[in-house]
Image (spheres, rainbow, N blue to C red):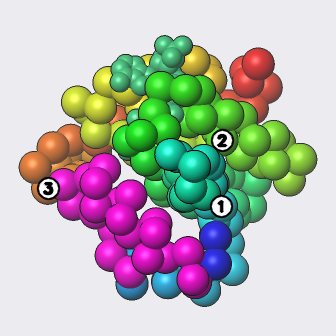
Amino acid sequence: MTEPDIDSVLDIEKEAYDRPWTRVHFEKELDNPIAFMYSLTGEHKGRHVFAGYVVFWVVYGEAHILNLTIAETFRRQGLGLYVMRLVLDMMKASRVDDVFLEVRKSNVAAKELYRQLNFKESYERKKYYGDEDAIVMRLVFNEYI
Ligand SMILES: CC(C)(COP(=O)(O)OP(=O)(O)OC[C@H]1O[C@@H](n2cnc3c(N)ncnc32)[C@H](O)[C@@H]1OP(=O)(O)O)[C@@H](O)C(=O)NCCC(=O)NCCS
């Protein structure tokens, strides 16, 4: 992901979340030396468009996934899983041992996706999203298939 991608990324972000990241969030992460950001493009109605993105941190053998979003028109086609597998392979190559992420308690789709990758529910962060608790999910790499 680069700065010129942010407009398209924000369109997907606003469509996906009640409390979307703002431009400042994305700009801050683009300047963050421990942050990795990738956007994904695809064909829709003959046009080349943004299909999703992922943002994660890697620091001292630990990784944290901050944002994984697939645009609505591209969902349920295996893209979320595909992106996550790529990201986990990158992390493994960077000798990451543990991967963490937060997910809304009610977010069945995301929790199912992460479970398929062998993430386990670790603990809850009360009112992490203001209106809802977060489940912290963790993947220990020697358990990753
Ligand atoms: C969660 C999200 C990234 C999944 O992306 P996706 O590309 O649609 O997911 P995939 O097609 O790769 O699905 C992989 C698995 O996830 C689960 N899954 C995905 N969408 C689901 C849904 N709507 N309901 C139940 N399970 C779902 C299924 O287990 C699915 O496997 P299957 O298709 O074999 O049943 C996408 O729905 C999204 O961007 N949601 C809004 C943003 C968000 O919640 N991000 C995660 C924040 S933690």
- Could you classify mark 1 by the number of other residues whose Cα lies within 10 Å: few (under 14), some (14-19), or many (20 or more)? some
Quadrant including the C terminus = top right
* In the image, residue 4 lies in the stretch drawn in magenta: yes
Q: Is the magenta stretch mostly helix, strand or loop?
A: helix
How far is the residue under mark 2 from the one under mark 3? Answer: 28 Å
Q: Are marks 2 and 3 in contact (CB under 8 Å)?
A: no
Q: Reply above or below: 63 against 84.
A: below
Provide the residue designation for mark 3: 130
Amino acid bearing label 3: Gly
For badge 2, the amino acid type reads Val
Outermost residue on the front side: it is 46
**Residue 141 appearing in the image:** yes
Please report contact status of discs 3 and 1: CB closer than 8 Å, yes or no: no
Name which residue lies at 32% across and 24% down: 108
Q: Which residue lies furthest to the right in this view?
A: 93
Looking at the picture, which amino acid does disc 1 mark?
Tyr
| SS type, badge 3 | loop
For marks 3 and 1, give the CA distance: 27 Å
Q: Whole-percent x and y of residue 68?
A: 50, 49
According to the picture, the residue beneath numbered tag 2 turns out to be: 83
Magenta-drawn segment: 3-23
* Badge 2 residue CB within 8 Å of ligand 1: yes
Asked whether disc 1 touches disc 2, contact meaning CB atoms under 8 Å apart, the reply is: yes
User: Is residue 67 shown in magenta?
Assistant: no
Percent of width and height locating residue 54? 57, 55
Query: Which residue in the protein does label 1 denote?
Result: 38
